[in-house]
Image: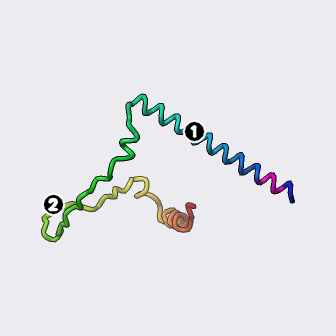
Amino acid sequence: MMKMTNLIQKKKMINNMISLIVKGIFIVFILLISSQRNLDFDAIRNKKKQKIEPLPVIDHSKVEYEAFNKNFYDEHEEIRDLPDDRVRSLRYFENNSSFC
């Protein structure tokens, strides 16, 4: 039992060290980018959030919109020419299949 506990502690210690190394590499990377692009990350971090005014409420019943056709589907000729039994089998398999 003692060996297992030591192994778990060593694994946690190694994971922590890897995490610190990755964070260090990330910080160095950010510093390199900021020095190349003259970015002031402190100024960006300390900048207060701007207040954004909400958009005005629109009463769509009072707006006259241009009429348009909502028929967006343009059936392909190969689909249109499929026999009925093939359409039924496709619908059956498509509706009963899961895409998880």
Mark 1 Cα shell of 10 Å, populated few (<14), some (14-19), many (≥20): few
**Figure label count:** 2
The residue beneath circle 1 is: 24
Q: Quadrant of the C terminus?
A: bottom right
The residue beneath circle 2 is: 66
> What residue range appears in magenta?
4-8
The amino acid pointed to by label 2 is: Glu
Q: Earlier in the sequence, mark 2 or mark 1?
A: 1
Residue 86 is left or right of residue 10, and the answer is left
Spatial separation of the CA atoms under disc 2 and disc 1 = 57 Å
Picture layout, residue 55 above or below residue 23: below
Mark 2 Cα shell of 10 Å, populated few (<14), some (14-19), many (≥20): few
| Residue visible at 32% across and 51% down in the picture | 48
The image quarter in which residue 38 lies: top left
The amino acid pointed to by label 1 is: Gly
Q: Quadrant of the N terminus?
A: bottom right
Where does residue 43 sit, x and y in percent of width and height? Answer: 36, 42
The residue closer to the viewer here, 28 or 71, is 28
